Image (cartoon, rainbow, N blue to C red):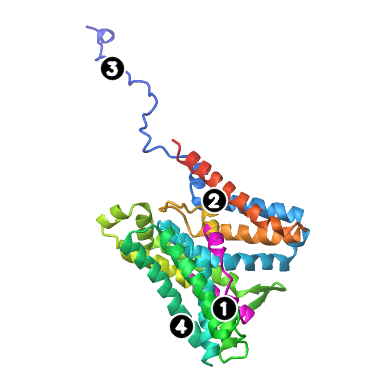
Amino acid sequence: MSMAQQAGPAVTPPPAPGPQQSDGRTRRRPLALRLLARPEVGVFLGAVAVLVFFLITAPPMRDGSSMANILYQSSVIGIMALPVALLMIGGEFDLSAGVAVVTSALTASMLSYQLTMNVWVGVVVALVVSLAIGAFNGWLLVKTGLPSFLVTLGTFLILQGVNLAVTKLVTGNVATDSIADMDGFDQAKALFASSFELGGVQVKITVVWWLVFAALATWVLLRTKYGNWIFAVGGNKESARAVGVPVTFTKISLFMLVGLGAWFVGMHNLFSFNTVQSGEGVGQELIYIAAAVIGGCLLTGGAGSAIGPVFGAFMFGMVQQGIVYAGWNPDWFKAFLGVMLLGAVLINLWVQRQATRR
């Protein structure tokens, strides 16, 4: 047999590569959809749109002092919106947050003035009272199993009545006396209500505190065990309890954080204006909740961020001042906010559905 007649074994060519199978679990969504899934991205885009709108329609907003004023208004809302947002992520909300701010300021003011004490004594006592109100809300909620709506609505009505009645009883008026000339006032004002110059513009210290608190809240949510507990109890508290999450501690501490925020804003109001009107604060709780909802926090709990409410509060500040700078009738402010709230909720719902669609 010649070499030409020798044949080797037949070699079967490899099959042509076909389309790879994917079960959906390993498929990565586009970057744009993954970004839209973040609760703070939608409100950031909305805030940019509102800012551009008012920069065009309200030329005074382009001035540095106007922007500083907007940031100040946003910070007063935002400081309270942060703990309210954490509470909402934990599955609850607090209707007493607005009047609790006034309760804190009234406590510090009347205690210091009526007993002729250093204002820092009143500040510390007000802190204890604010934390106690939050702890009471949380404890009653956990022990009774009642919805937070009913628990905090009751606290809201109690505090509203106490604020008016006690102030009239102690001072004979609906407002407290000025504490501007009392010991410790200047030091407390420097901490809670001072201003500093930045680029030739006076900026309120609350803007700095707002950003610091936002950074701290973000770190807590994303980098600590306590942050995991917040998301867990907001998603399903029974499942969270089954895996060892201290549900009672988490719920009560979240309400106490709201009390802490109410204390800080109350001290700012007191040392900014030297006196407190006892009937204020009603309706502010809805502003705080709305800022958190616009920021991507769900009323059902278990979802949200700390950055989203920052942009939500900034939108409120822009609208509140932008209407004035544009020369429009300020009576339309609440209507504008209502439209903005409904729009933000619908947009967030649409974005989440698009981002989670396979």
**Which numbered tag is attached to residue 125?**
4
The kind of secondary structure element at disc 4 is helix
Q: From the image, tell me which residue sits under label 3.
A: 11
Q: Is residue 144 left or right of residue 289?
A: left
Looking at the rendered image, the quarter that the C terminus falls into is top left
Q: Marks 1 and 3, Cα distance to the nearest angstrom? A: 84 Å
Q: Is residue 30 visible?
A: no
SS category of the residue bearing label 1? helix
Image position of 252 (left or right of 32): left
Identity of the amino acid at label 4? Val
Neighbor class of circle 2 (other Cα within 10 Å; few <14, some 14-19, many 20+) is some
Query: The N terminus is located in which quarter?
Result: top left
| Quadrant housing residue 15 | top left
Q: Amino acid at mark 3?
A: Val
Q: Which residues are magenta?
A: 261-289
Along the viewing direction, whichever of 295 and 48 lies nearer the viewer: 295
> Disc 3 versus disc 4: distance between alpha carbons?
90 Å
The mark lying in front, picked from 3 and 2, is 2
Q: Which residue is mark 2?
A: 41
Task: Give residue 192's mark.
Answer: 1
